[in-house]
Image (cartoon, helix red, strand yellow):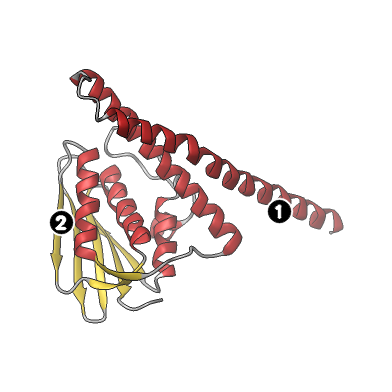
Amino acid sequence: MSELKEAEEQLARELGFRERMMGILGHDLRNPVSAVLSLAKLLHGDEGMSGKAREKLRVIEQSARRMNEMIGTLLDFTRLRFHGSLPVAVEEIDLDELARGIVAELQASHRGRALELSATGDLRGRWDPGRIAQLLSNLAANALWHGARESPVRVSVAGEGESVVLSVSNRGPVIAPALVDRLFEPFQQGTDSTGNGQRGLGLGLFIVREIVRAHGGTIDVQSSDDLTTFAVTLPRSDP
């Protein structure tokens, strides 16, 4: 028994060390990636740049943004492992304006894919704008990844009394009920339906769940008849 306990403690120490290293690595990588993004922004102002060179610059910028998102996700994962929750800084915001901005950004980076947005009711409340943007971006990116290419991804925000419901729907493979809970566990990755060959860290939905919890909300998943919907309910007041 003593040997087993010692082995468990050793494993815990090794896992803790690895997670700390992930945090340090993520933090240190942000500076060079930020430098690439800053340089790309400056180069966009070069009027003498050819169209071909400008297109290559957009690819570099998109890749750097993707790296920056992955670094942020790793840092969030490390915070959750060591602190148990994500920090949120709530302020008065309008989800209509925020959702339109996120959908526009995703549309620009997913050319050829259709994203539709509907916004109804009073969408004002107190939330962390950065975290809610991250939540919506993760859900929509997940829908674009797994959804059928020929079908649009639908984003909806609706004010309902003391809460706001944010949902993202896509056509595609049905998620088996037994797998729904596992979707929100770290490092879970599903099947790519887009054929684009890119893979994430498998942390996107895990981070979504933690953002929802930090805001005192709930998340529900419905998947049947080739339609999958992730619906997040957020109270308007501070968590």
- Residue 25, above or below 216: above
Comparing labels 1 and 2, the label whose residue is closer to the camera: 2
Query: In the image, what residue occupies the spot 20% across and 24% down?
Result: 47
Quadrant location of the N terminus in the rendered image: bottom right
Q: Secondary structure at mark 2?
A: strand
Image coordinates of residue 211 in percent, x first then y, are 41, 63
Extreme-bottom residue of the structure: 161
Residue pointed to by mark 2: 117
Query: In the image, what residue occupies the spot 78% across and 51% down?
Result: 7
Image coordinates of residue 104 in percent, x first then y, are 19, 48
Amino acid type at circle 2 is Leu
Question: In the picture provided, is 199 more to the left or to the right than 113?
Answer: right
Amino acid type at circle 1 is Ala
Residue pointed to by mark 1: 12
Quadrant location of the C terminus in the rendered image: bottom left
Question: In the picture provided, is 165 more to the left or to the right than 29?
Answer: left
Quadrant in which residue 190 is drawn: top left
Quadrant in which residue 194 is drawn: top left
Q: Is disc 1 in contact with disc 2, using a CB cutoff of under 8 Å?
A: no
Number of marks in the rendered image? 2
- Residue 45, above or below 87: above
Image coordinates of residue 50 in percent, x first then y, are 20, 18
**Mark 1 surroundings: few (<14), some (14-19) or many (≥20) residues within 10 A:** few
Question: In the picture provided, is 193 more to the left or to the right than 188?
Answer: left
Q: Secondary structure at mark 1?
A: helix
- Residue 69, above or below 128: above
Residue 227 visible within the image: no
Image coordinates of residue 226 in percent, x first then y, are 21, 52
**Mark 2 surroundings: few (<14), some (14-19) or many (≥20) residues within 10 A:** some
